[in-house]
């Protein structure tokens, strides 16, 4: 019988049988899949699990602290936080090409993860949040964005000399099943039903070269947009919603003074499969509130635009 409780029980037994008394390492991204694996493995094998969370400086506002609070503080999961903001930003300096940025971020992620992993002794297993659609996707295609996504997110590119066996307890499950299991394991609803966030994070939402200043501005704008979406009860009516930083300046006025500041674009879409998407028809009042708040609260922003492009031909992300 398929109930979340049965699936959890079954998965726990299988993991215990697979790893015995040995140690397991998990790359925790804060996304739904790796979070559910963390909660599941913690329940199954407790202190035999160590998670590595790479803070690449391209996370949303407070995201790193939230991940640490939920897993390390509240649940007592062993989580190593690798503060790698400087390392990522240094490597990204001067690079404006979207695919090159993705490669840099993906490779850095693997390097940092690897560094943390080699500090740990006697780890025999690597856990991954691979879900059934990932299995199909990587079988179907070995090229393009999708593959980059999985190799980055699921840390598929670890060096051979680490020689670890894989633990993939979600391999046979669809996203919705993973979410229900997450709830069963006690993860909060808002975490389990949050929008997807790309592996390269804000790196592909800052157009062109990534700079700390831009990331800081974008984090604030994005947080305002998400806060207002939640407040207006629109967050769960959209499939993905976020702010994008445009490194161009536009003129505005405040009182008597002229401002010449950056532009923020808002993107919100409705989609089932993320292959096609319609721009979300958000209420004008909501857009007005968000725009006013962003321009009033962030002095480096003078203008807000709403993206009314559908996919195709536009992609969901701007890069
Ligand atoms: P696009 O922009 O291709 O996005 O319409 C479709 C979905 O994929 C996500 N996306 C990514 N996820 N690494 C990821 O992990 C990436 O490089 C990447 N690029 C796009 C995007 O957020 C959307 O959900």
Image: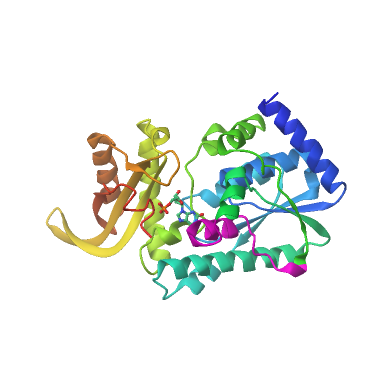
Magenta segment range? 141-161
264 vs 223, left or right, is left
Is residue 152 within the magenta segment?
A: yes
Asked if residue 9 can be seen in this view, the reply is yes
* Residue 193 placement (x, y as % from top left): 51, 36
Q: Is residue 146 magenta?
A: yes
Side of 17 where 142 appears, left or right: left
The answer to whether 290 appears left or right of 54 in the picture is left
Establish if 39 lies above or below 163: above
Q: Quadrant of the C terminus?
A: bottom left
Measuring from the top left, give residue 10's x and y in whole percent: 76, 33
Q: Where is residue 60? Give x, y as percent.
A: 47, 51
Q: Which residue lies most toward the bottom here? A: 94
Task: Tell me the residue at 14%/53% (across/down).
Answer: 255
Residue situated in front as seen by the camera: 227 or 280: 280
- In the image, is residue 266 above or below residue 109? above
In the image, residue 213 above or below residue 29: below
């Amino acid at each position: 019988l398929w109930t979340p409780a049965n699936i959890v029980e079954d998965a726990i037994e299988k993991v215990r049988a697979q790893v015995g008394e040995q140690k397991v390492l998990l790359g925790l991204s804060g996304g739904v899949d790796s979070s559910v694996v963390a909660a599941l493995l913690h329940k199954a094998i407790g202190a035999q699990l160590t998670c590595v969370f790479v803070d690449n400086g391209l996370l949303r506002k407070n995201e790193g602290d939230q991940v640490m609070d939920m897993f390390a503080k509240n649940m007592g999961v062993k989580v190593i936080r690798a503060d790698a903001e400087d390392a990522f930003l240094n490597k990204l300096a001067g690079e404006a090409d979207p695919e090159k940025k993705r490669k840099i971020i993906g490779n850095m992620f693997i390097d940092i993860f690897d560094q943390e992993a080699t500090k740990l002794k006697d780890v025999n297993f690597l856990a991954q949040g691979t879900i059934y659609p990932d299995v199909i996707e990587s079988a179907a295609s070995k090229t393009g964005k999708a593959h980059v996504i999985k190799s980055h997110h699921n840390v598929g590119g670890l060096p051979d000399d680490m020689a670890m066996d894989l633990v993939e307890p979600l391999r046979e499950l669809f996203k919705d099943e993973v979410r229900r299991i997450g709830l069963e394991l006690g993860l909060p609803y808002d975490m389990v039903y949050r929008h997807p966030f790309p592996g390269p994070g804000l790196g592909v939402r800052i157009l062109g070269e990534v700079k700390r200043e831009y990331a800081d501005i974008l984090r604030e704008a994005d947080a305002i947009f998400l806060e207002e979406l939640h407040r207006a009860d629109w967050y769960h009516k959209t499939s993905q919603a976020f702010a994008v930083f445009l490194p161009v300046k536009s003129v505005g006025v405040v009182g008597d003074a002229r401002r010449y500041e950056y532009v923020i674009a808002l993107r919100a879409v409705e989609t089932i499969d993320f292959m096609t998407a319609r721009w979300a028809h958000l209420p004008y009042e909501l857009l007005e509130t968000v725009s006013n708040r962003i321009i009033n609260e962030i002095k480096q922003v003078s203008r807000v635009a709403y993206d009314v492009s559908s996919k195709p031909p536009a992609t969901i992300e701007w890069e």
